[in-house]
Amino acid sequence: MIIKTASFITSSTKISQCPNPTIPEIAFIGRSNVGKSSLINMLTNNSKLAKTSGTPGKTQTINHFIINNAWYLVDLPGYGYAKVSKKLRGTFESFIRSYITNRSNLECLFVLVDSRHAPQTIDLEFIQWLGEEGVPFALVLTKTDKLTPQQLEKNNSVYTQKLLEDWDELPQMFYSSAVNKSGRDDMLPYIQSILDTVERYYKEEKN
Ligand code: GTP
Ligand code: MG
């Protein structure tokens, strides 16, 4: 896929504020600071598109971008942000969960996890929940530039073994670094294949 145009549409704090679900949508989620906004900028080759920050909890709204006038790319707020109160976190997370389960045009949710760390309960529980809800998702191990190829291979195998405890099949997995721009050549064709499938499906529905 060639990204010809990428522009910001809107930031929403309520589901009702989000753009109408008229075109397919691909969203990004993961713990605060995992690198969601940086990955979006890397994929779109636009360092200023999504706001990034060294301080966790930067993205607190649902941010819609439109790509090639054809699909929405969505930067979701991070989950598990420790610095907000438990009550606020609960409200916030139920808002995001409700978005994920109700958004009719959500075709794939990329779940980002930090490639440096062992699988975290919060991520595994979230993935489990996506499975129960039937939400299509793929995993992205981020910040791979911080690891040697050997460390990455080791962490990857720990991750896959952990997933296979609960899943018969592994989800699609990607490895990214916003620093050395890796992962783009695998993720963009994957997104394209999803969009092609959706388009075929809509055409068949019409006939
Ligand atoms: P929230 O919006 O707070 O949930 O964070 P986020 O997941 O959007 O993370 P963001 O992209 O803002 O990045 C968080 C920090 O990690 C920033 O300091 C980035 O520069 C850094 N970072 C993101 N991706 C990478 C990467 O691939 N490699 C390295 N080394 N650092 C990265
Ligand atoms: Mg962010």
Image (tube, rainbow, N blue to C red):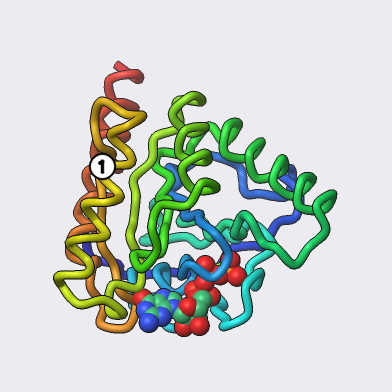
Residue located beneath label 1 in the image? 161
Which residue is drawn at the image coordinates 43% and 42% (left, top)? 24
- Please tell me how crowded label 1 is: few (under 14), some (14-19), or many (20+) other residues with Cα within 10 Å: some
The quadrant of the image that shows the C terminus is: top left
On screen, residue 138 above or below 55: above
Q: Position of residue 18 (x, y in %)?
A: 66, 49
Q: What element carries label 1?
A: helix
Which residue is drawn at the image coordinates 65% and 45% (left, top)? 96
On screen, residue 174 above or below 51: above
Q: Where is residue 193 in the image (x, y as percent from the top left)?
A: 22, 44
- Residue 48 in sight in this render: no
Q: In this view, does 134 lie to the left or right of 95?
A: left
Q: Determine which quarter of the picture holds residue 198.
A: top left
Q: Is residue 101 left or right of residue 151?
A: right
Which residue is drawn at the image coordinates 40% and 38% (left, top)? 107
- Residue 180 in sight in this render: yes
Q: Where is residue 67 in the image (x, y as percent from the top left)?
A: 40, 61
Which residue is drawn at the image coordinates 41% and 58% (left, top)? 113
On screen, residue 189 above or below 10: above
